[in-house]
Image (cartoon, rainbow, N blue to C red):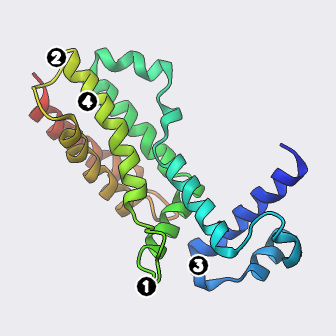
Amino acid sequence: MEKGEKRKEVIKEEALNLFSTLGFAGGSVRDIGKKAGVRESALYNYFSSKEAILLELIGDAKKESVGVELLTDELLELLSKPKVFIEKFTDSLFDHWSSTKQKKYLRLILIEQFRTNNTNKISINLLIDETIKIWEIIFTQMLKYKFIKKSEPQILAQEFVYPLFMLRLQHLTNEKVDWKVLRKKSDLHINYFWNSIKK
């Protein structure tokens, strides 16, 4: 990564720290520059405005929300054991969502979706929709190989992901995660869901 790219990443990181704590209105370009070690005037070499920083952060949050990189070859090989695959991929998602950066993205979007002049349509759906798309593909494959009852993949994905996302909101917004409770609730959801769709 070149020096300019590194500086831009530092600016984004400090903006994310600020916005996820105080919201977009809670900090100025000067505050971001000060935290990032960049003069306010120099910051405009990287971003045209504070809004541009926010939009790039929202784009990053959307891009990184699914954890597509979590679908490793090792995990994909488990598709022939669909319940095991669901359990392992869900565990990977929770691990991904529990990272400090993911928690900040979530807080940022939760704060900003209620901003009265939210012209950029910032919504929690930015995080949910991408995850649903991945699970829709997964359930389509499970249908193809007749592992599950005939159903609409998109509806299956929604029915599976929404409770996971509620668990994310309930357990992964805290600094300290009670993994035992989270895994127990997750297992109950997976078992119930799997029993309702398996052939």
Report the residue marked by disc 3.
24
* Residue underneath mark 1: 116
Side (left or right) of 71 relative to 164: right
> If you read the primary sequence from the N terminus, does the residue marked by circle 2 or circle 3 appear first?
3
Instruction: Give how far across and how far down residue 186 sits, in percent.
Output: 29, 45
| Separation (CA) of disc 4 from disc 3 | 38 Å
Q: Nearer the viewer, residue 43 or 78?
A: 43
- What residue would you read off at disc 4? 139
Q: Residue at x 15, y 35 (%)?
A: 152
* Dot 1: element: loop
Comes first in the chain, label 1 or label 3 = 3
- Viewer-side label of 1, 2: 1
Q: Is residue 188 visible?
A: no
Callout 4: few (<14), some (14-19), or many (20+) C-alpha neighbours within 10 Å? many
Instruction: Give the amino acid at mark 4.
Output: Phe
Secondary element under disc 4, as helix, strand or loop, is: helix
Work out whether 111 lies above or below 77: below
Tell me the amino acid under the disc marked 3: Phe
